[in-house]
Amino acid sequence: MRLSEKIARRTKAQGRSGWVYVLTLIFLASVFDASVAYFCIKSERRSQSELVQTAAAKQALESLQDALLQVNAAVSSGMASPVVIGEHALELTRYADARRALDTLSTIEPASRAVTRDGLSLRDLTAQYLESARLTLDQWRGSEKVSNGGGVGLMALNVRLNAVLSEIAVERNIEADRVTRAMNRVFGWSYWVVGILLGSVILTNLVLLALFSRLVATRASERHAMNTLAMSDRELRLLSQAIDDTPNGVLISRAEDGVEIIEYANPAVTSMLGYSNGELIGMRGDRLADPDDVAGMREALEQTGRYQGLVHLRARSGATVGVQLCISAVVEGVANPMHYVIVLNDVSELLASRERLRLQASVDMLTLLPNRNGLVERLEAMLADAAESGASCAVLFVDLDHFKYINDTLGHATGDAVLREVSKRLRERLPRDVMIARYGGDEFVIAALDYDALRVEALCRNVLSAVSEPVFSGSTELQVDCSIGVALCPLHARSASDLLRCADAAMYLAKADGRNCSRVFEPSLGREIEARLGMSNKLRRALADNELYLVYQPQYSLVTHELTGLEALVRWRDGQGRLFMPGDFIPIAEQHGLIGRLGEYVLDMALAQLAAWRTQGVPLVAVSVNVAAQQFASGDFVGFVLDALRRHAIGPEWLELEITESSLVQNTIRTVSQLQTLRLHGIRIAIDDFGTGYSSLSYLDTYEIDRLKIDRSFVSELETRSSRAGIVRGVILLAKGLGYGVVAEGVETPGQLAILRESGCGYAQGYLLSKPVMPERAAELLRSPERPPHGDPILTEDTQLFRFDA
């Protein structure tokens, strides 16, 4: 029988006995109340009967007193007047009333109840008085004189009357006291009946309430206990099932004479160690573990009663199994443990994965070359050997040229295939005494020990030759080049990090020299890097201190000769008055992550200037602001533009954003989405420096733009190279066919202007028309926008100031 069923039966029996107690108490209380009520009601009725009798006696005494007084009055009147005496009927009536009252009194109370001094009762005295009064009246009617024949005189008669009245008064007082006592008994018993019954009811109810509350509480606690035990019973069965089904191993051992004997093992343990359940039961637990591990376990259990750690257990096959072990001592009564509960978690796969991760931490899984961590470890060991032997060490930093374009256009799968092929060629072509590692992305590092300058130069040629061979991805042939930077130890640096930094700097110098070449680090290059870092810090302070300002270059219509737009160009004058052109700080801003802040700064200043001109009543034209590719790639650029328009209360039709072709091929999906959103809000989009980037006719159809800006490099050679003129005419025809406007940049001669007008170009800007001007001069031009798009240029600042356009 289950434990819960036994508890249910016992609880049911206890509940019945509780109700028997309650019903017995109710019966006893009812019997007690009925007995008290019977006794009290019987006593009350007796007191009521006595009260009625006493009241009747009192009334009879009063009637007797009245009748005696009337008799006395009749006797007195008869003695005074014979006429009255002659009224015999009246006398008889009064005498009869006195007799009736006396008879009534005799009926209620025995005559012997009250006795005078002479031994006579009230009845006797009254009867003597009435007899004397009758005789006296009879004598007066016969002779009209008082005789001695039984009659008495009036004085004696009055004395007797007074004696009778005195006795009646005494009796009346007695009866009055009896009435009062009877009434008190009647009402007293009533009070007692009500009080006892009420008290009994209250007491009984209180006792019943207490018993019932206790019964309910007991029933509730018993029900709760029964439910708890039932749940415990169910939980024990569930727990037993869970322990049997858990993937973690569970052992229970018994401590016996300093030895742990296994008493229970769940199926996970048998599966983990290969033993059967029968083999494990009764086995000593220390046989499964290494003796050193067992000693550590026992020491921890003696100190804290718990042990947790990673150990290796011996399986039945002899192999070791790595497990995370947790042991808890179960103490019963005394401090000595009686049992141990052991939980085993098989971590063999985890240990194997950890080993694989350790290898992956130092090996690049795509190329199977050492990664950056492995490179640093091996390079430091190589430099230590070089320092010990006095040999030199060369580090080559290799970067694949235009690799990002391959990823963006052909996909990352193709890019990965290129990296695998390049790493394979390097391993095959380079000497075995050099170390090859993948530094990250499209960058590789080659380290060679005890190589002189000639061997390093030959190594660089070998790398360039291996990388430059065509790479085939399916049916596509790819041409990949690389740029190499070289740093030598101890000539340039002595630590691994410094060597890598110097080689990286030399690699960027190779890229600046046209790519697909190698350059050796020079100390001046280090100074150039330091100068760039210094310029970056100054630019950060300049953005914080508002040292940058804008100038505006007008854009004119070649048809109406009107000023139709302004391009905002940024300038920087530091606190010492030195002027920096965009070519000085824009590349640094791009390299050091400042281009986003700079672009937002320029856009905000341009919109603020538009708001200022509107306040001054200056006619407005659209202002073009350059946007860098990084601004589309990071942050909420669209949200910033729309928020800036709202803050300055400028309509979107007064803003044109200029983006380069390179921006369009980076983050294509994100760029398309943001451009569409901007154009939906009414902001115009222009392609800047068209023809100098990754020119592709597909994006002209993909992106929704408004204008193309022909780069100044094409415009500057319109008069000297007919091919340039043909390209410009083709671009203008293409733009018109797509419905785009065309702006020519860098117009500096009347001949260039004439060719552009003949080719159908709609707008132009350049030194021939106007140099960039300060906001005050721009306001003057906006107030008189018409001017021929030829003639003398507007000179507002030194010509050298505007050698670079942003």
Image: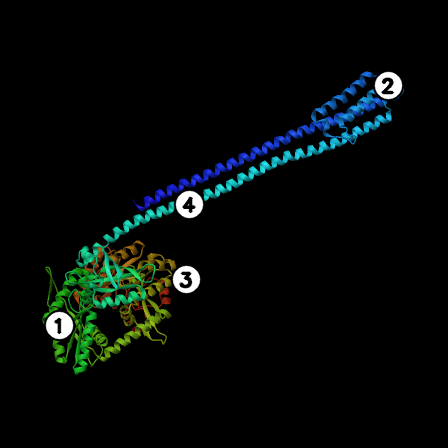
- Residue where numbered disc 1 is placed: 463
Which is closer to the viewer, label 1 or label 3? 1
Per the model, the C-alpha gap separating discs 4 and 3 is: 91 Å
Please tell me which residue is depicted at 35% across the width and 57% down the height of the picture: 651
Instruction: Say what secondary structure mark 4 lies in.
Output: helix
Of the image marks 2 and 1, the number of the one nearer the N terminus: 2
Please tell me which residue is depicted at 41% across the width and 61% down the height of the picture: 615
**Disc 4 + disc 3, Cβ < 8 Å:** no
Percent position of residue 408, x then y: 19, 61
Per the model, the C-alpha gap separating discs 1 and 3 is: 64 Å
- Residue where numbered disc 3 is placed: 616
Q: Nearer the viewer, residue 760 or 714?
A: 714
The amino acid type of the residue labelled 3 equals Gln
The amino acid type of the residue labelled 4 equals Thr
- Residue where numbered disc 2 is placed: 139
Q: Nearer the viewer, residue 631 or 549?
A: 631
Of the image marks 4 and 3, the number of the one nearer the N terminus: 4
Which is closer to the viewer, label 4 or label 1? 4
Q: Quadrant of the N terminus?
A: top left
Which is closer to the viewer, label 2 or label 3? 2
* Quadrant in the picture for residue 454: bottom left
Disc ID at residue 218: 4
The amino acid type of the residue labelled 2 equals Gln
Instruction: Say what secondary structure mark 2 lies in.
Output: helix
Per the model, the C-alpha gap separating discs 4 and 1 is: 92 Å
**Disc 2 + disc 1, Cβ < 8 Å:** no
Of the image marks 4 and 1, the number of the one nearer the N terminus: 4
> Where 301 falls versus 156 (above or below)?
below
Per the model, the C-alpha gap separating discs 2 and 3 is: 157 Å
Percent position of residue 446, x then y: 16, 73
Instruction: Say what secondary structure mark 3 lies in.
Output: helix
Of the image marks 2 and 3, the number of the one nearer the N terminus: 2
